Each structure stands twice: as structure tokens, then as C-alpha cells.
Image: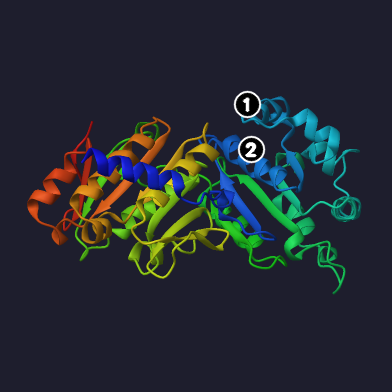
Amino acid sequence: MLSFIKEFLRRMEMQPSFRVEAGSVLSMREGEVAVATYMSTADKMKIFSAYIREGLEKGDRVDYTYPEENGEIVRAKLEEHEIDVEKYERTGALIMNNLTEYYMPDGNFDLDRVVKEGLDLRAEAKRKGYKRARELIDVGDFSFIDGQWQKYLEYWNDPRWGAPPGVGILYGPFITELTVFNVESMNEAQVGDILKAFGGGTYPHTKSIDLLENEEAFSKRINITHEKLLGCKFLLEFDPTFNYERVVEDFAKEAMANVEPIFVFTSKTSSIHSCLAEELGIKFFLSSVSTSIPKSTSKNTVILPANNMPLILDALSKALETYGDANVCFVFGILSELLTSVGQERTYLFLHHALDLLASEKVTAMFLFNTSAHEPQVTSSLKSLFGNQLVYGKNGLEAVKTS
């Protein structure tokens, strides 16, 4: 056994290395326009900071407009989330204004003036060579225009935002825009009217996001908070005849809602991949028998040689190195595949190394296991490695063991 471990580690050191990145914040594509809602219970600055930092790190020019009363808070929060505000403002990569000074410097909401200024800012970003212009407009509850959101909708829908063919600086992939509303004091009908109005504007494919919707999508299933979830390593035993994929989907959505990078190890033909493939915030590592080296097929997908445990561990290690100070989440849907192809002993060895790598309290992980596909003694031995065990079957999701 000792010689096998040494050989296993030696092979791990010899594997070709590669860079690991998570998907985009809020699952937004480049050039996409989105509207989002929030209430005071949402940690909006964690999400906004991640969206801004992502843009700055990608070479975008970022324009952030926020409610006047949040002025001191936003700068402190951006610094708290490791954004050097002074540096980026000095270089011009970050432009920050409160709503009043940007839209109403003389006390009037002058539509012609603010549209022209917005177009000029986008043209300037293009002229200065930024890869993209990324905009974040937190209009709060529209109190800066006395709650008259229809007035802002007129600005939103102004036909001048649609550039003539060939201009290429107003939309296309160059502009990524997120507009957010504080709906805490609004009733359901008002929120519905606003989302319908802004979602149905001249912007193509406007995406709608609820910043609170998935904050505890998975943790509430087992009656804990998101904070209690952090750092747990779960074994999820599932019955493939039931829709266990929805549990994994909630786990992934909760990670993304809390701006936690998430990585999923599975096969391309798995139901997990089918369920989550459209989520841009997820990084996939897909096992394949037709490749012998890691191969990126898209920004969010890397193909790994099937059952190559050293490469899987290398991917884990690189992900943890990249996000050393962040909460990170993993989903493993390959245990049954490993047990079938490389055997019980080597799978257990892999699990020991994986769990050692994931031991940090900042790392949350879910290992999927189809118990019906294996002998009872195999299942029992594997379960002994996990202090947190969940079962999903005809009774739904149940926590059978917690640590």
C-alpha cells in the first residue's frame, strides 16, 4: 500500500498543470444587460464588489453609480473586498458617482444631457482601449427622482442608446450593464410592473436577477443557514430514479448567489451536467475516455482524462490556489465512476487526498454517490470517511449524519 501511495504522488507531480478559473459573477455574459432586485437583508456590496473586481481584473473600464446616502459605505466596502479604489480611480479604470451628482447635478433630471454623457463615457472607454465598458447602476428605490421610476425608464428606453450599424461602441459585446433596484418598500405589484417595464425595453435579452432568491437555496433544505453550511464536506447518497439533480442545482445556485466560486467534476453525459450546463457561473471538469491531457473547450469547461486521479487532484489544488482567501465550493459526481474503473482501494486513496486538500473551513464540498450501484460493504467503507451524510430518495432530502 505504501509503495502505491508513493507512485500515486509521483504521478501527480508529473501531471501537466493548467490554470483554473470559476465562471462569471452573476452568470452574466459579456455584452449582456441585466436588472436585479435586492432588499436590505442582502449583502449587496459583496456581490457588487465581485462584479466590479471581475471587470477591473479583465481590463474593463467600470462605471459605478450608487445612492447618495451610500457614499461612505460603498468605498469602505470596496476596500474591504480588496479593491484599491484610489488606484483604479487614479488610472481612470474605475469611475464612481452618486445618483444625484451624475443624473441631477443642477437639481434637474435632464434627459438629453444624461444620455449624451452616457454615450460620451462609452465612446471614451472604447477610444482609450479598454476591453469592455462595465456599468453598475444602483438606483436604490428611485428616491433621487422622488420615486418616479417611469422617468428613469424613459432614460433607459431612449432610442439614442441603439447605435447605427457599424458604430460598435454602444452595445454588442463591448457593454456589460447591471441595473439594480431596492424593492424593500414596494409591494409585489409594483415590483412586477418595474421588472416588466425594464425587461421589455429596447435592450436585447435583458436578464432579471433576484439577489435574495438563492442565498440559502440548499441550506434551507436541511434547516441550517448559509454560514453553518460553509466548510462542510457532504456525502450525498442518491437514488437515480428520483430528481436528485435539483438538490445539486440548489447547492450550486446558493454558491453563486453568495459569490462563491463553484467547480463541478462530472461526465459530459451525466444528468448533473445537463441540469447545470447553462449556468455561466460554474466551472466544469468533464471526464472523457477520448483525451489523454487536459483540454479547455470553452471558458467554463475543461475536459479531463477519465479516471486520472492525479489530474483531478491537480485541478483541485489549482482552484484552491487561485481562490486562497475566498469561500469555494465543489461538486464531485465521479465516485461511482472511479470505483468501477480503478477499484475500491485507489478510490479511497483519492478520497483521502481530496478531503485533505479540501480540509479548510472556507471550502464546502458535495460528493455524490449512487449506493444502489455498489456492494453494501463498499458503501459502508466509503461513508465512514464523511462526517456529514445526506440521503435523497422518495422522502426527499434527509440529513442522516452531521458533524
Instruction: Specify whether 340 is left or right of 92.
Output: left
Q: Residue at x 33, y 58 (%)?
A: 307
Residue 361 horizontal/vertical position (percent)? 39, 30
User: Measured along the vertical axis of the image, is residue 26 above or below residue 317?
Assistant: below
Quick one: 103 or 209, which is closer to the camera?
209
Figure quadrant of residue 131: bottom right
Q: What's the mark number on residue 49? A: 2
Does the CB distance between marks 1 and 2 fall below 8 Å?
yes
Q: CA distance from mark 1 to mark 2?
A: 9 Å
Mark 2 neighbour density, 10 Å: few (under 14) some (14–19) many (20 or more): many
Residue 145 horizontal/vertical position (percent)? 76, 43
* Residue identified by numbered label 1: 80
Q: What's the mark number on residue 43? A: none
Instruction: Specify whether 358 is left or right of 18.
Output: left
Q: Earlier in the sequence, mark 1 or mark 2?
A: 2
Amino acid carrying label 1: it is: Glu
Residue 240 horizontal/vertical position (percent)? 22, 63
Identify the element where label 1 is drawn: helix
Amino acid carrying label 2: it is: Ser
Quick one: 321 or 151, which is closer to the camera?
321
Figure quadrant of residue 374: bottom left
Residue 59 horizontal/vertical position (percent)? 75, 47
Residue at the bottom extreme?
165
Q: Residue at x 49, y 54 (%)?
A: 283
Whether residue 299 is visible, yes or no, is yes
Q: Residue at x 14, y 44 (%)?
A: 381
Residue at the left extreme?
376
The colour mode here is: rainbow
